[in-house]
Amino acid sequence: MQLGDQSWREYAIFIRTLARTKKYNIKMWQHRNLIVEKKKKIDEKLKEVTLSEELNEIVGELQPFLKSRIYQFETAIKTNIKYSLLILISNFVLLIVNILLFTALYSLIFNELNCPKQFIDTLYFSLVTFTTLGYGEITIPDNFFRLFSALQALTGLILTASFTGIIFFFFDNSSDNT
């Protein structure tokens, strides 16, 4: 079967149209895929925006609660610092009273045992016992009265440890607030 010139032209136009249509369809398909991908990206961003809006709403609701809790915490810290300063001062006073009380007690003990000491000697003995150094230059000859020395050494340990702990607490908290 032979085609005439007219038929060849029509066939060529048909093939060209078919090729253009195919190219057009391919471009349209590619364009459609791009649109779908862009739509997916936009949907993801919208979800992120929606989530961030929800988070902002939640944070907005929690903000007054959190601010009140932070204020309560700051107030508690300031109150603790005031109390720790009070405890620090009272503990220091206890240290001094302990040393002076035992100094007077040791003066009485040494006088009772007929080996009187000067005030400076009993103060020295009291400080050495309080700090648990125990040099041994001055000793109490009676076993019963040695219990007072042991009691002072024990209270010296306790008061010194608590005094050190309170000082640490006071300076540790005051450096956090500045």
Image: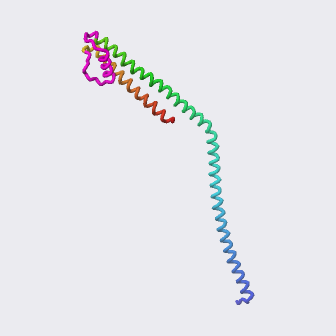
Magenta segment: 111-140
Foreground residue among 110 and 13 = 110
Residue 46 picture location, percent across and down: 65, 53
Residue 21 picture location, percent across and down: 69, 75
Q: Is residue 93 left or right of residue 177?
A: left
Residue 63 picture location, percent across and down: 61, 39
Residue shown at 52%/28% (left/top)? 79
Vertical comparison of 28 with 54: above or below = below
Foreground residue among 121 and 64 = 121
Foreground residue among 37 and 65 = 65
Q: In this view, does 99 lie to the left or right of 135?
A: right
On whether residue 132 falls in the magenta region, the answer is yes
Residue shown at 66%/59% (left/top)? 39
- According to the image, what is the colour scheme of the structure? rainbow
Vertical comparison of 86 with 114: above or below = below
Residue shown at 63%/54% (left/top)? 45
On whether residue 113 falls in the magenta region, the answer is yes
